[in-house]
Each structure stands twice: as C-alpha cells, then as structure tokens.
Image: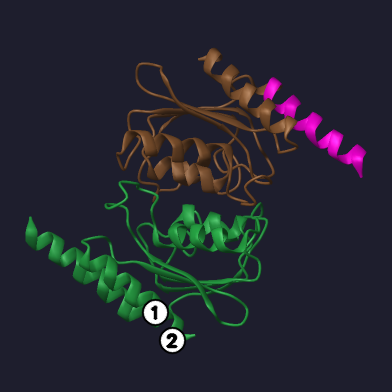
Chain colours: A brown, B green
Amino acid sequence: MKQIMQIALEEAQKAFKLDEVPVGAVIIDKEGNIVAKAHNLVERHKDATAHAEIIAIRKALAKTKDKYLSDFDIYVTLEPCPMCAATISLLRFRRLYFGAYDVKSGGVENGARIFNQPSCHHVPEIYGGIAESKSAKLIKDFFAQKREKF
Amino acid sequence: MKQIMQIALEEAQKAFKLDEVPVGAVIIDKEGNIVAKAHNLVERHKDATAHAEIIAIRKALAKTKDKYLSDFDIYVTLEPCPMCAATISLLRFRRLYFGAYDVKSGGVENGARIFNQPSCHHVPEIYGGIAESKSAKLIKDFFAQKREKF
C-alpha cells in the first residue's frame, strides 16, 4: 500500500518540477499491477479539469474498454476535489486511498462530501491520510515557493 | 434562450435514438454562437463519465485553448450530476441553464448541491427548469421503453 502511494508521490514530484500543483495519482488492478499513473497538468494542458485523477482515469478507461472501473483501486496524494470524488463514484472504483486532507478544495472529508450524500450511488472503501505528511509537505513547499516568486 | 435549449433537446433526442439516457448539452460564447454540442454517450464510449456536459466541455476546451471557460454558458437538458456540476464550477462557466430537475442523481438543487458549498470557488448564474417538461418527458419515455423491453 505504502509502495503505491510512494509512486503517486513521485508523480506529484513530477508535477512540482513542471510548476504544477503537486498532486499524483496511481490506479492499480486487483492483482496490484499499475494500470495508470499521472500527475496534475492543469497548466500544461490549459484545462482546469486536468487533475491527476482524471488523467489517470482516462488512461485506465482507454486500456480496460469497460464503462466502469469496479475492479480497480485509485491512490491520490491529496484528498480528491468534488469533481474527482464524483468521478470515482460514477466509475465504481473499489477503493480510494488518499494522502493529505484538503480543507480548502477537498470533496471527500470536506466540502461537498460526495460519498456521504444519500444520493451517491456508489461508495468505494476509503482510506485517507496515507503518507499524509509527505504529501502535505509537497503542497506546502510548492505554495511557499510560489509566494516567494511574487 | 429557449432556442438554445431546443438544440440541447435535439441532442438529447439523438441519445434517445442510440439507446442512451437522453441528455443533451450545448455551450455558447458571449455572442451566442454555439461552440460545442453533445449528447450522452456512456454506452457507446464505454465510459460512465461520458455525460453530455463532459463531452461538450472537452470539445469547447479543445477549441478555446484556455484553461477556463469563463466567457461561456452551458445549457443542459437535465440537472447536472455532482461530477458535471463540479466540472462546471472548476471551469468557471458564466451561466448554467438546465431543464428537468433530477431528484435521484442531480447535484445542483439535489444531492451534493455543489454550488451551495462554502468551499465552492466559483458559482455561475444558474437557471433551472428551462423547457423542464419536454426534457422530463424524454427521460420518462426512455425509461418507460426500457422497462417494456425487460
């Protein structure tokens, strides 16, 4: 479990180096094989929805050719936003593991709390706070560096 | 306004003919020009996230090459789900017009009520219930026909 989150953190580092908000995501199958990994590319893609989760999900869907990702688990270094959380629900992911909690923009334990809605049709098993401090440090360092620049 | 929703309803009809849940979406620019239109293609695309809004948005982003769609309005025949509503917020749409309300899966006036969350960073102007009965009838007819088949 930690090893997969480590790979997600390496993805987040790649985003950091590209001056993108450092978030990484990895999708694995039931056997633990990595089927997709990605990092946030909002600036590069000129697309405010190009979150790590969404890019990894698009890659996984292209591979599986199934309309759901029921047999898959997703690891994300930061608590998914409402868009990503609702996407994870629609695709019926088996498990969601995430790193740091995101009070400002998260949609799992914060904000819209997507999976807590009675009308949420699929709730994965959810494990938050995995490698939380490492993930939070990346985000904190990123924004500290941003502030120094301006 | 009604004219654009009529075009969105024609998109929904296309979905109906393809045996897809009949939902259509149209995106217009400030001058009222249509920049993208689409219908639900979840089954055809084998992708549970291939909602009308998402497909129209991907087309619009490809055209505009901007990371936000701030100068655009989106028309949808059905109340957007939480994923689509959160996507509309992230992209900073100017206005959202929608048709029928969706008690079961909507995320604007129902469920996660995405735009009502204090942590929702952008709320468009929202107009619900446009051509509501036509849109609702399409959905109702679709599921009635589905039930007959089984």
Compared to B150, does B127 lie above or below? below
Question: Which residue is labeled 2 in the image?
Answer: B3
Return the x and y of residue A17 as percentages of the image width and height.
74, 30
Label tally? 2
Question: Which residue does the image show at 35% across and 20% down from the upper left?
Answer: A30
Q: Quadrant of the C terminus of chain B?
A: bottom left
The chain holding disc 1 is: B
Chain under numbered label 2: B
In the rendered image, residue A83 lying in the magenta stretch gets the answer no
Residue located at (53% from left, 63% from top): B60
Left or right: where B86 falls relative to B10: right
Residue B57 shows up from this direction: yes
Q: Position of residue A16 (x, y in %)?
A: 73, 31
Is the residue marked by circle 2 packed among few (<14), some (14-19), or many (20+) residues within 10 Å? Answer: few
- From the top left corner, tell me how far across and down residue B21 is, in percent: 28, 61
Q: Position of residue A133 (x, y in %)?
A: 70, 21
| Helix, strand or loop at mark 2 | helix
**Residue A115 drawn above or below residue B26:** above
Residue extent of the magenta highlight: A134-150
Residue A145 counted in the magenta span: yes
Residue flagged by tag 2: what amino acid is it? Gln
Q: Give how far apart the Cα atoms at labels 2 and 1 are.
A: 7 Å
Check disc 1 and report its element: helix, strand or loop.
Answer: helix
Mark sitting on residue B7: 1
Q: Amino acid at mark 1?
A: Ile
Magenta segment main secondary structure: helix
- Crowd around label 1: few <14 · some 14–19 · many ≥20 (10 Å): many
Please tell me in which quadrant of the rendered image residue A94 appears.
Answer: top left
